Amino acid sequence: MPIKARIDMLSTGVRTPVGIKIFGANLKEIERIGEQLEGILRNVPGTRSVFAERVAGGYFVDIVPRRDELARYGLTIGQVQDVIQSAVGGENVTTTIEGRERYPVNVRYPRELRDNVDRLGRVLVAAPGGAQIPLAQLADIQLVQGPAMIRDENGFLAGYVYVDIAGRDVGGYVEEARKLVRDKLALPQGYVLSWSGQYENMIRVRERLKVVVPITLALIFVLLYMNTKSAFKAAVVMMAVPFSAIGAIWLFHFLHYNVSIAAWVGMIALLGLDAETGVFMLLFLDLSYDDYKRRGLLRTRADLDEAIVHGAVKRVRPKMMTVTAAFAGLLPIMWSTSAGADVMKRIAAPMIGGLVTSFLLELLVYPAIYKL
């Protein structure tokens, strides 16, 4: 989980499965909107926790130079800032050498001369004429409360709302939460919301899958056509592929898995595996049909049925061996508890469930389609 949170933080800036970015021009208004979102999202089923960033983070000394006073004494803002820097922040005046190590020597005012606003106002600034002028006469010094960190994204001030969910898929949760927020939250003009976190990655991958899946299906069809030299036979295999998805979906439901990127990867792998077993089925049906035709046994419709059944029965043992070998390789993943097991289980689950239904349904569907 720490590695996962770090990756999410680096990729989207949000360390929870779902996050909301609030963009606007005023930090206080962004904080107010975030607090409203907290109350709204707590009512969404599946919300484990929700937290909106708070703007106030600490107290800071705010020093604003008076330009008219600086002009009266012939000083510049840079000269005043140099004095403040040397008095409060300090300056490295030399380096001390101790053996093979070097340490900078920093000089600044003692703590008792700079630990409150009044004493900072007594810091002396040298004027060009030699006069020593207190800083309080040249600048307004006050203690203000402000944010410890200011987020800036796409040219706007930003605030984050972190949402952790449990027992729900990210996509379904965000759709319901988005609708609830749209109904109950009125955004001021100039403020916008952006949903982020894993949902942002999911949308990006979904758009990519819209391209990858059709290309994968097209490549499978081309390879099948090159193998069978028949567009009809290639189409038969492609038509039977969805039957394997039945088992994958049922196993997802049984294991209470949500559809995720890993699940789609497993579904794509299942398409290739199902196409492979479909080619074997067509091969045995073709061999049986050619054998009956060569021996002159295809005289009636019943003879055709017998040839198809004979080819399908001969396919049972090879298909059983193929499914058993795949099971032997995939089932241990479902009992794995090592690092990355959660992802691997969701890749293997659709392949295991799909093999079960494809084994049963292909023996019935392929012969029926082949007979047409």
Image: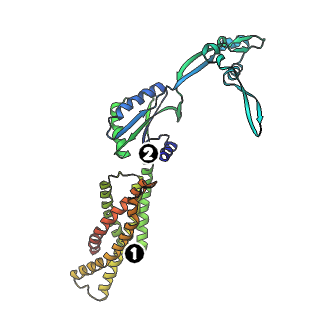
How far is disc 2 from disc 1 in space, using C-alphas? 42 Å
Q: Nearer the viewer, residue 355 or 305?
A: 355
Q: Which residue is mark 1?
A: 228
Q: Which residue is mark 2?
A: 198
- Which element is circle 1 on? helix
Q: Image point 33% across, 73% down: which residue? A: 320
Q: Image point 53% across, 24% down: which residue? A: 58
Residue 231 at least partly seen? no
Q: Residue furthest front?
A: 99
* Figure check: 107 above or below 15: above
- Circle 2: residue type: Gln
* Figure check: 19 above or below 59: below
- Circle 1: residue type: Thr
User: Quadrant location of residue 341?
Assistant: bottom left
User: Quadrant location of residue 166?
Assistant: top left
Q: Nearer the viewer, residue 53 or 235?
A: 53
